[in-house]
Amino acid sequence: MKITVVGTGYLGATHAACLAYLGHDVLGVDADATTVDTLSRGRAPFREPGLDDLLSTGIALGRLRFTTSLADAAAHARVHLLCVGTPQSADSWAADTTALDAVIDGLVPLLRGRHLIIGKSTVPVGTAARLGEGAATLAVPGTTVPVCWSPEFLREGHGVADTLHPDRSVLGVPEDPEVAAGAEAIFREIWAAPLQHSPLVVTDLQTAEMVKLSANAFLATTISFINAVADLCDATGADVTTVSSVLGMDPRIGAGALTAGVGFGGGCLPKDLRSFGAATAELDLPVAGELFRAVDAVNRHSRRRLIGRAVDACGGCVMGTRIAVLGAAFKPGCDDVRDSPALAVAAGLRDAGAQVSVYDPVVSRGAGRDVDSVAEALRDAELVVVGTAWPQFRDIDPVEARELVARPVLIDGTNSLSARRWADAGWDYRGTGYPARSVAQVPGWKPASTADTAN
């Protein structure tokens, strides 16, 4: 099948390469000429394991190419996937759908005959219906352009696998039964191989939109919930890692997001949560709005809490203190620094006067990282803060690391390192929600306060 993918950021580039891998003839379209040039050379402008290989293979086989021209897209295919970004608006919590509107305005008048638009972007409920009405108005006589919506569930760092082997797919279709049946048939043909092993839920447009927003809001709520529990653990001497483990054994809850720490970030969860909050205000649902605002507030508090721990560990002031922050990406497995908790903590410590060195194994210099190795970050550091749960940081030898630092004090903002391993190596290890027994006192150095040793 011939398919266009409009918008070749993380979502669109991954979809275009995977569709070509599945045997389709794919044209990727983006307004940014630099992005198109990079992708045309078989390289993604971001890190995603396996994507460069798929891009190169698709291009070599003649199944994949990229352009800046919507006219080329209109001529290439009758099925068009919309993958453009919907960031948070600059002046509110609502999502900015300007880019989606621009694609509809630019593409639809160029189409001739029977076409199908399938939206993939995360959008406020009601967007698909509105775009469908706009497309019907803009279409030339004799042309039909129904708009469906199939939200993506990709995780950065797992995007290729999640596209080719989804755990579920959702397709929202218009009310017209004939249009809905035709759209479902085309969707099943596009994703024939992946759908052999995962369910497809076909529903109305607004439910499909709500599914995606709800999934991200629920994940955000889970993360903020366990961070709120971690605060209680800090205050009572309980161990949040054991609490999380037992909660995760409950089949009604699951363990996926029950890791206390510095909270969530990235380009999806924060803005989708706020978009949900904006919708509750528009629909006059204040109680639901309070929940989403509270989740967002707990998440922002998690960053401030880590900064506060760092200040406490330095005796109440970090002015002039050399601090190593390990991690810049918002989560391991990607080079995305959008709304990164690690960088927010680094910035907060710098604002307080600390000399901060940031290392990340993937993020490039200038994008957040400012040293080139763990050793360089640790050398002469008076405090080490882990801000991203990279597996490379779990492999650090705490004995060797102690020889590099000026003072062996580590705050694990991700709860991903072994508290006992670091404590046995003579470090003062401080996680989130850990009891005092998990902390080893450093010979010759006394923490700022007795209460702080429980952090």
Image (tube, rainbow, N blue to C red):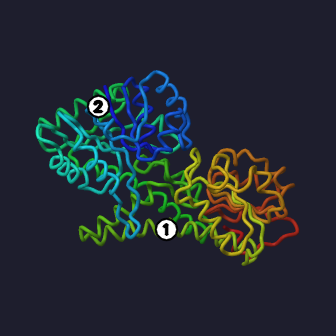
Number of numbered discs:
2
Secondary element under disc 1, as helix, strand or loop, is helix
Give the Cα distance between marks 2 and 1. 46 Å
Residue 175: name its quadrant: top left
Mark seen at residue 345: none
Foreground residue, 226 or 298?
298
Q: Is residue 438 visible?
A: no
Q: Which residue is mark 2?
A: 77
Foreground residue, 199 or 208?
208
At a point 72% along the width and 65% down the height, the residue shown is 356
Q: Position of residue 301 (x, y in %)?
A: 53, 70
Q: Position of residue 32 (x, y in %)?
A: 45, 47
Q: Is residue 23 visible?
A: yes
The vertical placement of 339 against 7, above or below, is below
Q: Quadrant of the C terminus?
A: bottom right
Foreground residue, 80 or 92?
80
Q: Position of residue 124 (x, y in %)?
A: 30, 57
Question: Please, what is the three-letter code of the amino acid marked with disc 2?
Answer: Ala
Secondary element under disc 2, as helix, strand or loop, is loop
Q: Nearer the observer, disc 2 or disc 1?
A: 2
Q: Residues within 10 Å of mark 1 (few under 14, many from 20)?
A: many
At a point 53% along the width and 32% down the height, the residue shown is 42
Residues at discs 2 and 1 in contact (Cβ within 8 Å): no
The vertical placement of 448 against 36, above or below, is below
Q: Which residue is mark 1?
A: 298
Decide if residue 59 is on the left or right side of residue 77: right
Name which of mark 2 and mark 1 comes first in the sequence. 2
